[in-house]
Amino acid sequence: MFTLSRDEVRELDRRAINEFGVPGVVLMENAGRGCAELLMRLNPERKPVVILCGPGNNGGDGFVIARHLDNAGWPVDVRLFAKNNGLSGDAALNFEIVTDSDIQFTQNDPAYFSDPVLYGQFLDLSFNRAVWIVDALFGSGLSRLLAAPFDELVAIVNASGKPVLAIDIPSGLDCDTGEPLGPTVKATHTATFVAHKRGFLNPASQAWTGKLHVIDIGAPRVLVDEYRRQTRV
């Protein structure tokens, strides 16, 4: 087993794109498809899935997951927690695909953040019909505690009693230490990319990650092997 720190994750992605010519959207596609295939194995009964998407690339992975679940006939519902101009790059591209594919989604309006009644209704719609929850809010790059409304959302996820698949790392967990930065999603399973994260060496992290699954995102083997040699434990 080898591990990647927060900085190494960022560097590996950058090098795969800039040095090896693998487009970022291809890495995102591979990540999302791998997670979708895992979730289909975990949920063979095709029970309804809600995917909670944040404003960054972790949310972009969630959009890809939604498309592949929908293509395979799994009932899926996307909840995007970002303002209209909050998406960019590969995440924005994959959100456009979701919106053009007639996949059920709701993008929050800023009013949901300030009006507790509207926000409560938004969350109720997210969880009442779902059996599985996908945490695609924030990934390994997060280095600060989650503020409102994500702290409240995490509390609702953890209190739901539903199985949770975290994408790359449970939102709120520190990639390097394996300790919560603040409110943190407690996952049943975590689909992490390329390799275990450095913080997963901390036994306490298992209470948040649940069972770990490593997803290949198509980064060149020669590049991954370089990090494997440097960080093998």
Image (cartoon, rainbow, N blue to C red):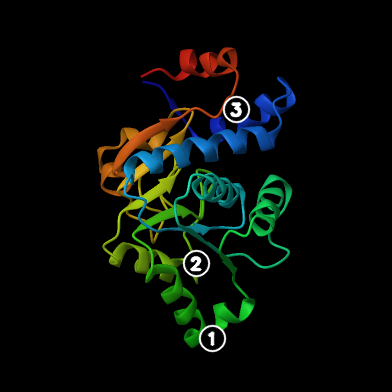
Residue tagged 3: 12
Disc on res. 147? 2
Residue tagged 1: 115
- Eye-nearest disc, 1 or 2: 1
Residues packed near mark 2 inside 10 Å, few (<14), some (14 to 19) or many (20 plus)? few
As drawn, 141 above or below 151: above
Rendered location of residue 71, percent (x, y) = 54, 46
Counting residues from the start of the chain, the first of labels 3 and 2 encountered is 3
Task: Please state which amino acid type lies under the numbered disc 1.
Answer: Asp
The extreme front residue here reads 73
Please identify the quarter of the rendering in which residue 163 is found. Answer: bottom left
Instruction: Write the residue at 70% across / 67% down.
Output: 84
Residue 89 lies left or right of residue 126; in this view the side is right
- Eye-nearest disc, 1 or 3: 1
Counting residues from the start of the chain, the first of labels 1 and 3 encountered is 3
Rendered location of residue 184, percent (x, y) = 38, 57
